[in-house]
Image (tube, rainbow, N blue to C red):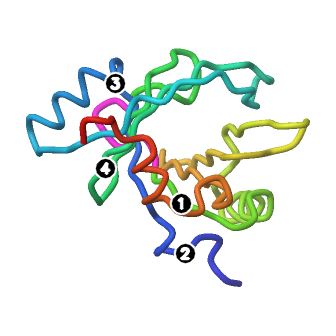
Amino acid sequence: MASPLNATDLYHTGIVVPDIEEWKTWFTGIAGHRWTETQSFDLLVRLADGERVLPLRFAYSLDAPHIELVQEIPGTPWTPAGRLATHHLGYFCDDLPTTSARLEEAGFPLEACAVVDDSMSIFAYHLDPYGVRIEIVDRTRMPDFAAYLRSKAPTWH
């Protein structure tokens, strides 16, 4: 059986933080990272305990390898990973439901996913028993990631 993911589709490492703007400043000072503007929107998300609209906030580093900073949302999967700083590894995929099912078969149960028109959409999080979290993202949402980053960069860049 083929693996559910392709190594070349890994495009970011996600870190959940208590304050995105503070962490953007910190990473810039430490390593010179440049950032997209912070994106913010409410999204219907299916969790183990049901569906909720959550206020998602995130920003990507403009330079590869890409870091995604995600605003903490207490009581959800978007909580800091404790001493292990990495929250998730983000992969693009071509078929979100099929890739999700294959990850479940490989021992990564579904933890959360966005819901549009009562169906899994946009992204899904899968968490294995050891705490490794994989985010799969529908490639059609960002078919040209470099162009997406440029479109979200502050105008002063």
Residue 40 vs residue 125: left or right? left
Which of pointers 2 and 3 indicates the residue nearer the eye? Answer: 3
Residue highlighted by disc 4: 62
Which of pointers 1 and 4 indicates the residue nearer the eye? Answer: 4
Q: Are marks 2 and 1 in contact (CB under 8 Å)?
A: yes
The x and y percentages for residue 87 are 42, 40
Q: Going from the N terminus, do you reach mark 2 or mark 3 first?
A: 2
The x and y percentages for residue 1 are 71, 84
Q: Secondary structure under badge 1? A: strand
Q: Is the magenta stretch mostly helix, strand or loop?
A: loop
The x and y percentages for residue 2 are 67, 83
Residue highlighted by disc 3: 20
Q: Kindly identify the residue that appears in the image at 60 percent across and 24 percent down.
A: 41
Question: Label 1 amino acid?
Answer: Tyr
Q: Tell me if mark 4 has few (under 14), some (14-19) or many (20+) residues whose alpha carbon lies within 10 angstroms of its own.
A: some
Relative depth, front residue between 135 and 111: 135
Q: Which stretch did the figure color magenta?
A: 81-88
Q: Distance between the residues labelled 4 and 3?
A: 15 Å
Q: Do the residues labelled 2 and 4 touch (CB within 8 Å)?
A: no
